[in-house]
Structure formats: C-alpha cells, structure tokens
C-alpha cells in the first residue's frame, strides 16, 4: 500500500503547490512586463518552479496510478461543474455554482490565486488536465496488466493521441478562453462554449487512455503545446485583448496542459519498465 499512498500524496500536494506558484509567478510577470522594457526574472522563476511541480504531479504515474486518478478526477469533476452550472443567485431563480463560490472564497484569502483559479476552472483547463490524468492513470494500469503492444497499435495510438491532445488544446484556447473572458469580464454564461469545453475534456481523456498503447504521440504533442505555451506566456502583454486565448496565455495555462501531458507520458513509460507485481494492489 506504500506506492498508492505515496503517489496520492505527490499528485495532490504537487498539483496544489504547483498551480499556486504558477499563479503567483504569472501575475508578477504580467504586472512587470506591462511596463516598457519590463522583465520579471523572479516571476518567471516562480512560474517555472510551479510548472515543474505540476509536471511532477503527473509524473507520479511512475510510482502508481492512484494519485493521478484521484487528482485528475477531482479536477475533472470541478471543471465539469464550472462549465455546466451557470452561476447566479439561487434565491433569485439562478443556479448555485459551487465552483464559483469556491473561487470567490479563494479570492478572499489570496486575490491572485482566486483569479487564477477562476480562469483555471471556467476556461476548461481543469476538465482538460483532469480528464487527461484520469484517462492516463487507467491507460497505464491497463498497459502494465496486458504487456507490450504491437508496432501497429503503437503507431495508430501515437497518431491518435497526438491529434486528440492537440485538438483538446485548440478547443481550450479558442472556446475555453472566450468562455472564461465572458465569465470574468461580462459575467455572462454561454452554453455553446461550455459544450465545447466539455468536448475538449473528452478529447483529452481519450488521449490519456491511449497511453495504454504508446506514450510517443502524447509526448510529441506535449512538447508542441509547451513551446507554443511558452511563447504565448512570454508574449502575453503583447497579445491583443480580443484574442480568445489571451487570459490563458497570461496565466500560463497552456504550459500547464503541456507540462501535465509531458509528465504523464514520461511517468507512464518509466512505470511500465518496472516488474509487474503478483499483488494487484501494487500495480
């Protein structure tokens, strides 16, 4: 039982700490770079440390699949609720949104974390990385149970995994970014954008499950997302406000998606090399 507990502790602890550090670093970097010639090295360092922890949380698959499954399921559930529950005054005919209330409580404690949490959940980032982690946990567990895959299965799953992850990221960037901007700036709910956010989560979950056959496609797609996310993060002050992914670029959430996918792909591969135990609890 040591492996499941350790993976759970690492996945949950590193996720919370990593997202918090990334939020503070992104806010500091954004505030500094708004000024001409501004460059905030401490903010970048803080964001980098946070992203490393986020990647470490996904890499917990190298220890056991339980941690990624639990952390991913919580993110996916809260992300789903954020998208499908329009916030409003329940006493005035509106629907009570638990996620919106949680982000407001976080804002009362720390304004930066509260704002970042709002974008994280209401952009669909939470459901994307949550569904991916949960799918990856199930995929890696199945890989260890059934052993190596054929070369054809590896090739097909690699192409599909890469395409699904990139598709989920594109939907997140366009639909999710627009949805979050409407929530934060206009306090308006758009059901069609919410549906696209849920679809992005489904695509990401399928990409995670495809780690069952191969990590190559997800690994390569994750590298692409990280490169694009890093460029968007560094150029965030110059990104036009009308661009739907402006909030995601500013918060470094594309990097969060890419680092999560990369950590899971590497962690699943490392775990796959270890001997399969006779006791199913330690799978």
Image: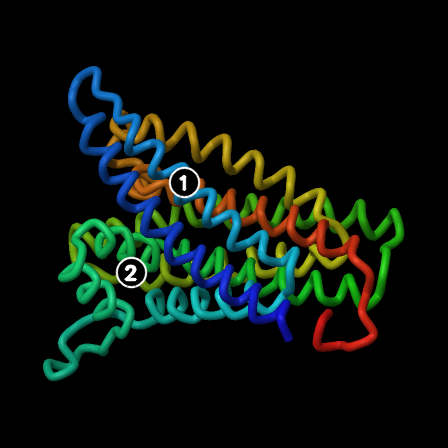
Task: Determine the residue positioned at 27% across, 51% down.
Answer: 116
Secondary element type, mark 1: helix
Q: CA distance from mark 1 to mark 2?
A: 34 Å
Task: Determine the residue positioned at 56% across, 65% down.
Answer: 6
| Residue 99 in view in this figure | yes
The residue to which callout 1 is attached is 49
Dot placed on the residue nearer the N-terminal end, 1 or 2: 1
Please tell me whether residue 11 is drawn above or below residue 258 in the rendered image: below
Q: Nearer the viewer, residue 177 or 18?
A: 18
Numbered label attached to residue 185? none
Please tell me whether residue 135 is drawn above or below residue 246 in the rendered image: below
Which dot, 1 or 2, sits closer to the camera? 1
- Residue extending farthest to the front is 2
Please tell me whether residue 211 is drawn above or below residue 173 in the rendered image: below
Secondary element type, mark 2: loop
Task: Determine the residue positioned at 26% across, 26% down.
Answer: 40
From the top left corner, tell me how far across and down residue 168 is, in percent: 52, 50
Q: How is the image coloured?
A: rainbow
Numbered label attached to residue 190? 2
Screen quadrant of the N terminus: bottom right
From the top left corner, tell me how far across and down residue 138 is, in percent: 66, 67
- Residue extending farthest to the left is 92
Task: Determine the residue positioned at 78% across, 48% down.
Answer: 156
């Amino acid at each position: 039982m040591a492996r499941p507990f350790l993976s759970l502790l690492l996945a949950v602890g590193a996720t919370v700490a990593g997202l918090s550090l990334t939020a503070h670093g992104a806010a500091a970097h954004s505030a500094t770079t708004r000024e001409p010639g501004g460059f905030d090295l401490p903010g970048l360092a803080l964001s980098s440390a946070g992203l490393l922890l986020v990647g470490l949380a996904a890499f917990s698959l190298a220890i056991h699949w339980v941690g990624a499954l639990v952390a991913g399921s919580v993110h996916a559930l809260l992300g789903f609720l954020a998208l499908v529950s329009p916030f409003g005054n329940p006493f005035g005919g509106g629907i009570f949104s638990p996620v919106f209330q949680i982000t407001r409580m976080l804002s009362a404690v720390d304004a930066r974390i509260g704002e970042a949490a709002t974008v994280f959940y209401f952009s669909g980032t939470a459901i994307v990385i949550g569904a991916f982690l949960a799918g990856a946990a199930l995929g890696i567990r199945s890989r260890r149970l059934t052993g190596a895959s054929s070369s054809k299965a590896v090739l097909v799953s690699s192409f599909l995994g890469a395409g699904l992850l990139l598709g989920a990221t594109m939907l997140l960037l366009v639909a999710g970014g627009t949805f979050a901007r409407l929530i934060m700036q206009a306090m308006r709910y758009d059901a069609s954008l919410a549906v696209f956010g849920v679809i992005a989560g489904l695509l990401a979950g399928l990409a995670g499950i495809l780690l069952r056959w191969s990590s190559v496609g997800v690994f390569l797609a994750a590298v692409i997302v990280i490169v694009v996310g890093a460029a968007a993060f560094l150029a965030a002050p110059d990104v036009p406000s009308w661009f739907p992914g402006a909030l995601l670029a500013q918060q470094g959430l594309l990097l969060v998606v890419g680092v999560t996918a990369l950590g899971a792909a590497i962690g699943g591969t490392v775990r796959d090399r270890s001997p399969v135990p006779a006791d199913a609890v330690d799978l």
